Amino acid sequence: MGHGGLPRTADVVVVGAGSAGCVLAERLSRDPARSVLLLERGPARWPSDAVRDLRTLPITADSGYAVQHPEATGLGVVRGSGFGGSSAVNGGYFLRWHPDDFADWPTGWGLDEVTTAYDELDRPGGTMGVSAFGDDELSDAARRFEDYWGQWMPIRPPDDPWPIVGVNRVRSNRAGMLRMTAAEAYLRPAARRPNLVIRAAEQVDAVVASGRIVSGVRLGDDVVDCGEVVLCAGTLGTAAILLRSGLDTAIGGDVLTVAEHREVLVHYRTRASGSRTALLQSVVHTQDDLEIRCYSADLADYIDGLVPVGPAVGVAAMRPGTPGTVRLGATGAEVDLGAVAADVADRMANGVAAVVEMLGSSEFGDLVDERSVTVDPVIRTSQHAWGSMPMGSRTDPQGAVEGVRGLRIVDGSILPAPGRSGPHATVMMAACRIGDLLTSAR
Ligand SMILES: Cc1cc2nc3c(=O)[nH]c(=O)nc-3n(C[C@H](O)[C@H](O)[C@H](O)COP(=O)(O)OP(=O)(O)OC[C@H]3O[C@@H](n4cnc5c(N)ncnc54)[C@H](O)[C@@H]3O)c2cc1C
């Protein structure tokens, strides 16, 4: 034993107990003959009901369940930390991508395979407890939002799992008003397996590589030897590990590119108070690849420390143009989300204009204080960063790093193309499928 009682060896080391890592740890430890060591940097306690409550986002640094990454322009870029990773602190929106978003995925990711993997997660009775918010659960704002857009756009039937260009009632991974985290769904049921060792408060610095052969992970002065490392540390955590590991040419240099759904917020003031509910219950997907998000209330009601500025409607570009970058800084991954391409900015401006018009409409008339609508001048982040090691180029269709033996990545890093919904369901879908392929290959 080394570092706080770490095993010295394992067949597989999984780094990160987040959305994907919990799935991989569960899948790989199904075979009792395979020893699996799961290393997580966050705290060694299961997120409590207060953390998992969908009516709050515990993402400030002092929550103990989130890490802030520096961003070049000062935007707060945050990631979950601890059992469940970002699934324990996120918005609880769990929509599939659109079927045609998979057109550019590599071989082996046809719609049949993708559907089977999504089904495990989000079918009725599926692992993630997914259900659409009911009519009786909708915030006042979400109800008006659907009435407004439903006048000229189709409305997806609530039990259809595939989103449409039109009005999409949010499907949420939940048990009542608690987030169903990846840890609750996958890790807790497997936690007592004798061949699965779970260690929290253990931050992996780098993989141990000799040339293009990876043989373990390094934590401070300690090394754990293994046959394969599976990096599930999230797009930014995995980038930091790769950049510290001396694999420069295999991963494309010392700067990785990263994609993000940039978002503009339109705020308004309201006298209505309404009961607290989940942050996001209804979105519109437009023909020109925008997601218009009707937030239920002021973001300050959900996130400690924010200055109240009124409820918001977000306009997010779901097919971003120019990518951002991730490089290694003194404290880990440093992000530069970059400039928004001119054509994307134009589309976002059109979306913002449509939202301003909506907030002045009769549907919103008595909810929105007159002359209170303001457009936030900053183009923000959705906290979705993905695609730094895409399958089909830097990694193979099962996440193995091209040209490197013993190293696989299964998390948001490997999503190979943009999707028109948030990434959570799709990161987990990819983890389920790769987990199946690895299990059946043995
Ligand atoms: C605040 C917030 C809100 C979001 N809301 C939504 C939403 O509503 N819908 C949606 O679709 N998407 C949402 N997302 C995005 C979604 O949650 C993520 O895309 C998804 O959870 C990513 O999964 P992952 O497995 O790649 O990484 P994560 O779930 O972030 O897991 C990475 C894990 O690795 C651990 N780790 C990192 N580095 C190390 C290291 N060096 N050593 C050991 N462990 C390490 C971390 O602590 C973490 O537990 C949101 C994200 C955030 C942060």
Image (tube, rainbow, N blue to C red):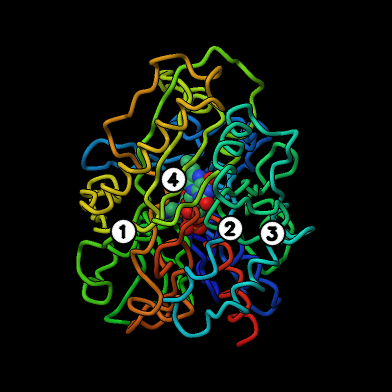
Q: Is residue 429 above or below residue 210?
A: above
Labels 2 & 3 near each other (Cβ < 8 A): no
Q: Residue at x 20, y 48 (%)?
A: 339
Label 2 to label 3: alpha-carbon separation: 8 Å
Q: Is mark 4 within 8 Å of ligand 1?
A: yes
**Corner quadrant of residue 436:** bottom right
Report the mark closest to the observer, 2 or 1. Answer: 2
Disc 3 target residue? 160
- Amino acid at dot 4: Arg
Disc 1 target residue? 258
Q: Judging from the image, what secondary structure is the residue with disc 1 in?
A: strand
Disc 2 target residue? 163
- Amino acid at dot 3: Asp
Q: Which mark is residue 79?
A: 4
Label 1 to label 3: alpha-carbon separation: 31 Å
Image coordinates for residue 346, horizontal then vertical, percent = 26, 47
Report the mark closest to the observer, 2 or 4. Answer: 2
